[in-house]
């Protein structure tokens, strides 16, 4: 079955760095656009990074641009998120997301999330 398993979350001090990983299985990973989202308590889930199927293009919201880097390895079915200069208000559950549209049908998969806590 489809699985997206995130790892790498934890406690980090403000200004620190963290690398999240997402291992995918059960679907054709290389055909899916991959993204990372985050959701803080009481807030909506927000997009933080997206990478195209071949990794040639990435997009970020202004809030994380130049601090976060998304990458993927289609041979290993993994997508990573390197985060630096983390801020306390970036404490959230971070989710891995896969999506594609084929023949008018949207396929969207989510991981279970990994907690990132930015605190001194």
Image (cartoon, grey):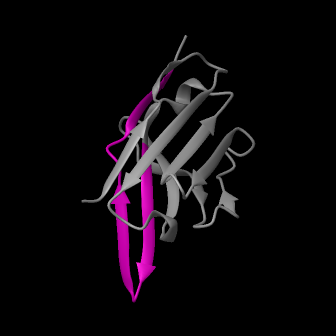
User: Which residue occupies the extreme bottom position in the image?
Assistant: 103
Q: Main secondary structure of the magenta part?
A: strand
Q: Position of residue 19 (x, y in %)?
A: 57, 33
Q: Which residues are magenta?
A: 95-118
Total marks in image? 0
Q: Nearer the viewer, residue 20 or 38?
A: 20
Q: Left or right: where does residue 103 sit relative to residue 53?
A: left
User: Which residue occupies the extreme left position in the image?
Assistant: 1
Q: Quadrant of the C terminus?
A: top right
Q: What residue do we see at 51% from left, 66% from top?
A: 30
Q: Nearer the viewer, residue 79 or 48?
A: 79
User: Which residue occupies the extreme top position in the image?
Assistant: 120
Q: Position of residue 18 (x, y in %)?
A: 58, 28
Relative height, residue 101 to residue 118 (above, below) = below
Q: Nearer the viewer, residue 23 or 66?
A: 23
Q: Position of residue 87 (x, y in %)?
A: 61, 26
Asked if the stretch drawn in magenta spans residue 116, the answer is yes
Q: Quadrant of the N terminus?
A: bottom left
Relative height, residue 54 to residue 14 (above, below) = below
Q: What residue do we see at 65% from left, 61% from top?
A: 55
Q: What residue do we see at 65% from left, 53% from top?
A: 60
Relative height, residue 35 to residue 18 (above, below) = below
Q: Left or right: where does residue 16 sit relative to residue 80?
A: right
Residue 97: name its quadrant: bottom left
User: Which residue occupies the extreme front position in the image?
Assistant: 75
Residue 107: name its quadrant: bottom left
Q: Nearer the viewer, residue 68 or 78?
A: 78
Q: Position of residue 56 (x, y in %)?
A: 70, 64
Asked if the stretch drawn in magenta spans residue 101, the answer is yes
Residue 26: name its quadrant: bottom left
């Amino acid at each position: 079955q489809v699985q997206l398993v995130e790892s790498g979350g934890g406690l980090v001090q403000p200004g620190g760095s963290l690398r999240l990983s997402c291992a995918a299985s059960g679907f054709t990973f290389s055909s899916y656009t991959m993204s990372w989202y985050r959701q803080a308590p009481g807030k909506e889930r927000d997009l933080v990074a997206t990478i195209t199927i071949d990794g040639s293009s990435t997009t970020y919201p202004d809030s994380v641009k130049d601090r976060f880097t998304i990458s993927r390895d289609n041979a290993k079915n993994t997508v990573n998120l390197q985060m630096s200069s983390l801020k306390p208000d970036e404490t959230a559950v971070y989710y891995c997301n896969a999506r594609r549209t084929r023949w008018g049908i949207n396929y969207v998969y989510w991981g279970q999330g990994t907690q990132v806590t930015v605190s001194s």
